[in-house]
Image: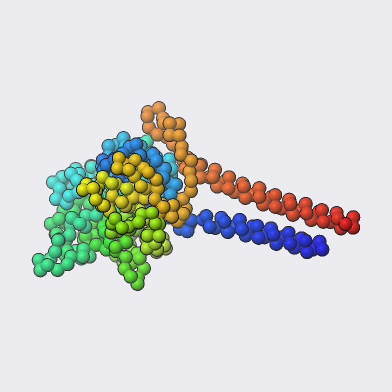
Amino acid sequence: MLKKTVSIILSLLFLLNTAITAVAQEQDPKLDYREDFSWGVCMHSSNWGPAYFDANLEEQVHLAAEMGCRLIRIDSYAPFDYLDKFMMLCQGYGIKVMLIVYFPGGETVTSNFSEDAISDYFYMYADRYNGKNGFGKADYIQIDNELDHTLMMESYPDGDYVSGKDMSQYNQEYIANYAIQVQAAVEGVKRADSDVKTIVNFVGDRHGFTDYLYAYGIEWDITGIDWYSNIFREGITPFWVGDKIHELYEKPIIVCETNMFGKDEYFDENDPSNWDILVKAFDDIYSKDYVEGCCIYELSDELITADDGGYDQEGHFGLLFTNEDGTIKEPKPVYYRFKEIFGGQDIEMPDYEKYLNKSGGIDFGDFRVNKAHRIWLAVGAGAAVLGILSLCTAVFLILKLKKNQKSGK
């Protein structure tokens, strides 16, 4: 009788432990085990419109951190006080920053700025955000953005389609000038901070212009690929261009932008299953050890881009619903789906006033790690208490049974 009872108790304890483990496994994220990979999200800076005005900044970085993002990509089109605050917020949450710095004068490859002027311009950003001046740290600096659009010829003289995969498909005057500018930009960045990684990006597999840079000895650290759902192909792995590009340059890759492409008024943003194809791509991207990160484009909807009042997919790429004045309504359902995949967790919103230093800057420390640890320590402590109570109950029942046996009951 005693042996049978002990066996039942042990079986119950085993089932209890299995149930606890199963619950924990259900809550575990699917793609958060690589220490050398960062899930991320793109933001625009305050000059793009109300969705990214300063009033939203603290909540936006907080929501990105809760989603499990360890990287945020942002442009430099903003006053320094905005970028300073953004950088320090990211530092406080333990989030890396990819800063897009455009060539002086805007997105152009026909710039009249000298090489020295371009070098000094990029030096200015890299030096300010080198992590030593109290303004935070830019871990990556992207050299301009998607210039394959500007550099590519519209068509061959005979009208053939231009894919962007070959150097001959680019305006040779533009691309020669661009190569000089990239070299000057990289020199300025490295002169300020030898640790920051430089990125050159393109859309899809339009690698003809980076082939040109590589052939002429122009250096950059990481190749950036903007990879949307319309580039996926049936019957092959979603991130099919990755192996090819990595073999060409033998450089790490970051997916600088990705999302569902071709959204219209019939695209249901409240149905997270509409992102299934993107989740399959995540799995493929994450499996490649030469890929260092992947950024969703973008964090907030920007309804202001729909100037005619109609549906504009550029205004609906966000993971957060927004009002027309830019204020945040709520995260979309797909935000929570990504949060589970990325290993996100709820984080208590810090009282930022406590972190203001005497000079008016922000000195956060690493409150993200502290808050996260508190949450998981509480969960762990609860599980430990439950285990101890279960063990004590089992011992008590065994002793009681022994006592009953001796008394003949």
Query: Does 6 appear above or below 316?
Result: below
Nearer to us in this view, 360 or 269: 269
Question: What residue lies at 34% left-to-right and 50% top-to-bottom?
Answer: 318
For the C terminus, the image quarter is bottom right
Nearer to us in this view, 19 or 114: 19
Give the percent coordinates (x, y) of residue 106: 19, 46
Nearer to us in this view, 89 or 349: 349
Counting every numbered tag in the picture gives: 0
Q: How is the image coloured?
A: rainbow
Nearer to us in this view, 218 or 284: 284
Relative to residue 385, is residue 374 drawn left or right?
Answer: left
Give the percent coordinates (x, y) of residue 183: 23, 51
Give the percent coordinates (x, y) of residue 392: 73, 50
Residue 99 visible (yes or no): no
Relative to residue 258, is residue 163 drawn left or right?
Answer: left
* Residue found farthest to the bottom: 235
Question: What residue lies at 34% left-to-right and 36% top-to-bottom?
Answer: 55
Residue 2 visible (yes or no): yes
For the N terminus, the image quarter is bottom right
Relative to residue 230, is residue 37 drawn left or right?
Answer: right
Relative to residue 404, is residue 389 drawn left or right?
Answer: left
* Residue found farthest to the right: 407
Question: What residue lies at 17% left-to-right and 49% top-to-bottom?
Answer: 108
Quadrant in which residue 37 is drawn: bottom left
* Residue found farthest to the left: 157
Give the percent coordinates (x, y) of residue 314: 27, 52
Question: What residue lies at 27% left-to-right and 37% top-to-bottom?
Answer: 79
